[in-house]
Image: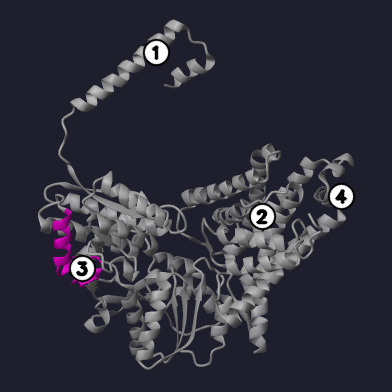
Amino acid sequence: MVIFMKLLSKRAITKVQSILLTIIVIIGIVGVYYYSISQPTQLPQTIKIGFFAPLTGPASADGYAALNAALLAVSHINAKGGVLGKNLELVYYDDALNPDQAIAIARKLISDDKVVAAVSGSYSGTTLAASIVFNSSGIPLVSSYAVHPDITKNKPWVFRVGMLGEVEGKVAGYIAVSKLGARRIAVLYDDIPFGQTLASSFKAEVESLGANVVYYDKFSDKERDFTAWLTQIKAIPNLDLLAIFGYYYHSAVLVQARNLGITVPIIGAEGFDSPKLIELAGKAAEGVYIVTDLDRDSKSPIVQKFLADYKNRTGIEADMVAASAYDAVTILAKAIENAGSIDPQAIKNALSKIQNFEGVTGLIQGFTAQRNAIKNIVVQVVQNGKFHFYAEVTDPKIITPPY
Amino acid sequence: MGAVILQLLLEGLILGFIYVALSIGLTLIYGVLRILHIAHAGIYALGAFFALTFHYFFNIWISIILAALLAALIGILIERFAYLPILDKPPYVPLVISIALYILISELSANIWGQYPKGFYTEIPSIRYDLFGISVTTYQLLVLAIIAPLILILWLIINKTKIGLASRALTQDIEVAQIMGISPKKVIDFNFFIGSALAGVCGALVGIYYAQVYPYMGDIAAYKALVVLVLGGLGSVIGALVGGLILGISETFLIAYFGYLLPREAFAFIIMILLLLFRPKGLFGRGM
């Protein structure tokens, strides 16, 4: 082709040559066409599952964690013989954390790739956008770790394996007051749906348990300098605890808090659940509590195999984003197996009937009426540069999603 | 109460100096080329990555100097290969190219150094000193101790040397300056060199100060430097200094006393809009 172009561009071509070339090209096209229609239509060799996550832009680290874990889940499943005698195949795209792109991807997965179901490895905004398309097209979608309540609300085709933001905030509030004994609490949160949901449910739980929230403010997701907030927090008399609902990339908040001389215990949530938090904040991460659903100290062989294989595959330690994406794929595979068919309706019904599924984020007892996973919530604490078990909350009154 | 105000003033001052160091480059480049050099924020992020990478082999001081030199080199390459060939095009062309370059730099960095933020720890111990109820860390002192003298040196170069005079002449009128025998190419190179080196140092220091370096760290920096550029009056170095310090200090106090009303980016732009309404040439602008 390159030679053809060069010949044309140099105009060094004679009439005879040009006719010959045209004939060759026509024969080639006709040949390829006949070859392609002579192939018999093949039955699908694999069962296709759609997947989207932010693989470029500021959230790409989480996107890749989710993707690698999803691919790991697929390889684990296929190594055990696949599903319904066929291999699983993950068809994935980059949503760049852009809801418009997530909608386009959802349409492409459904109409071009003909996936039987899909998994979201993305944040709330993109997952919410895509969930509308999947729900209206009648293709099951399992969301890994996005916390926004509307993702599953009134969408019978959309399920969530991760924690609901409201539950997570409630558990953090319960731990802060009942286990850590805090009475005067400061709250600082990331001003996106994740932080807003957690902070408001945390505040409600803390106040219902009789403690006081004496400082309540937010910061922009891109913020790296928290000294203005922390200087005010430091000046609060008799403060018992600081709750920070941000992400691991807000690690500077921990460093700056300790540098300013704030010594009270700090509690965070799944956004802090990343080995990167410890790497970035160093000593300032010591003693920080996080509410999560990944228990690194779990005795479960499923969890330990996942942690080891993920580390092997990616070279980094797994976090709850990876664990949730892994569970989303495996629970979907289980549902397809239980359904005994790749019919989306059957898969959806099987998903809603799943009970006591053992995942790497703990035992999923089942789904609520609005398809949120019911599971125990874990609290980890950073000790000697590692996340360790601190507590597990099993009280159904606290951990059951309200809808 | 007094201690809290002094503490906030210190935090605001440090933030302000970072903004100043970042926007001086933009100011110098806008002055001679009339280009909004958005990719400057990419050079700032690269400075941090370069320092981090050199730090695997050298001590932190040598790493910062090497990072500054490499950042300056990239600045000059951008000038030669991206801006100079398109100077005769309408102003939106260099602007689009500059934004594209910024995205290219951040995505390339994400590919080279990975999507995750990288921790930046140095041999300089992080020690907290408490003086009169104010806490100050060695890293905060580091930022002040490097950026403030650099700005002073730069001010001396621009005001007391021949190349500084040439740069100022070009800023005022490129054609008349050429008639007077000033070679614009040399001055443009010089401005890109100084501006990019300063951005590189600034990125390295911010990386050390916040203990992390990440591919998209230029995102906010780009807005901020732009606001400071306009605030100070496009092309004025003293304006960038005053504008940057005002922005850093007022942001810090507003957040501390009124809570978080708006993201910092939005806040910075509100200041910019107000200023443009009441003093369209900026604080120190000469009406360009």
Residue beneath the point at 55% across and 82% down: A261
Residue type at mark 1: give it.
Leu
Span shown in magenta: A344-372
Question: Looking at the picture, do discs 2 and 3 lie on one chain?
Answer: no
Question: The residue tagged with tag 3: helix, strand or loop?
Answer: loop
Under mark 4, the amino acid is Lys
Mark 1 — on which chain does it sit?
A: A
Residue A364 belongs to magenta span: yes
Which x, y percent locates residue B14? 66, 71
Q: Is residue A383 visible?
A: no
Q: Is residue B108 above or below residue B119?
A: above
Indicate the position of residue A290 as horizontal and vertical percent values.
37, 75
Q: Are the residues at dot 2 and dot 3 in contact (C-beta closer than 8 Å)? A: no
Res A300 label: 3
Mark 4 = which residue? Answer: B162
Mark 2–mark 1 contact, CB under 8 Å? no
Q: Which numbered dot is residue A21?
A: 1
Closest to the camera, between mark 2 and mark 1, is 1
The reply, left or right, for residue B169 in relation to residue B69 is right
Q: Amino acid at mark 2?
A: Ile
How far is disc 3 from disc 4 in space, using C-alphas? Answer: 73 Å
User: Closer to us: mark 4 or mark 1?
Assistant: 1
Viewer-proximal residue, A72 or A104? A104
Which chain contains the residue that carries disc 2?
A: B
Q: Spot the residue most to the left.
A: A340
From mark 2 to mark 1, how far is it between C-alphas?
Answer: 59 Å
Q: Element under label 4?
A: helix
Tell me if label 2 and label 4 are in contact, CB under 8 Å. no
List the residue tagged with mark 2.
B65
